[in-house]
Image (cartoon, grey):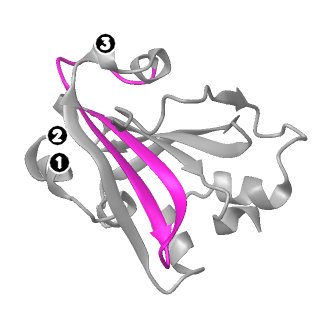
Amino acid sequence: MYVMDETLFTSQPIEWIAQDDERVPANMLDWLLELGSMTKRFEQHSQKVTVIPYLERYVSQVMLSTEEAQNLPASHRYWVREVVMYGDGTPWLLGRTVIPEETLTDDDQQLVDIGRMPLGRYLFSRDNLTRDYIHIGRSAERWVRRSRLRLSDKPLLLTEIFLPESPAYR
């Protein structure tokens, strides 16, 4: 019997690298350092962008990677959402969002119920969104980026793995 992995993100370690690392092609760096919504960027390359959630649940801090725990404040629980983002039915990106429970206050409690809505569509429609940083890296020949974003100055961590069919590689 085949059992699905608990997460989309455990199979390969991520090597974080400097933004000026010569291994990063200029066209890929442009995608990795995108400051706007990746959903909107993908929409420029497809008729339809869709998201299929793979995992959506609360976890304790021990369920986070060491790096995730280091990049977020300590919390009793974290909302974790993993998705596959598709452009015209082709998988383009794996996304993992980790949100401390304390971030999920007032209107932002809606984040646990966005279902198939792309995260960027929710986040970039808010006027209280800021970004602390973007880290870039590689994992099994795929480019990766990690951003710590803030809603009303409350943090969340978003990790995105660009899949081989993504327009970022063209």
Magenta stretch: includes residue 125: no
State the image coordinates of residue 19 (x, y, percent, origin top left): 76, 39
Q: Secondary structure at mark 1?
A: helix
State the image coordinates of residue 149 (x, y, percent, origin top left): 41, 43
Q: Which residue is mark 1?
A: 112
Does residue 37 appear anywhere in the picture? no
The kind of residue tagged 2 is Leu
Question: What is the magenta range?
Answer: 71-99
Residue 46 or residue 89, whichever sits in front? 89
The kind of residue tagged 1 is Val
Q: Which residue is mark 2?
A: 104
Q: Residue at x 39, y 34 (%)?
A: 5
Helix, strand or loop for the magenta stretch, by majority: strand
- Does the residue at mark 1 contact the one at mark 3 (Cβ under 8 Å)? no
> Which quadrant would the C terminus be assigned to in this image?
bottom right
Disc 3 and disc 2: Cα gap in Å?
Answer: 20 Å
Residue 21 falls left or right of residue 90: right
> Which quadrant would the N terminus be assigned to in this image?
top left
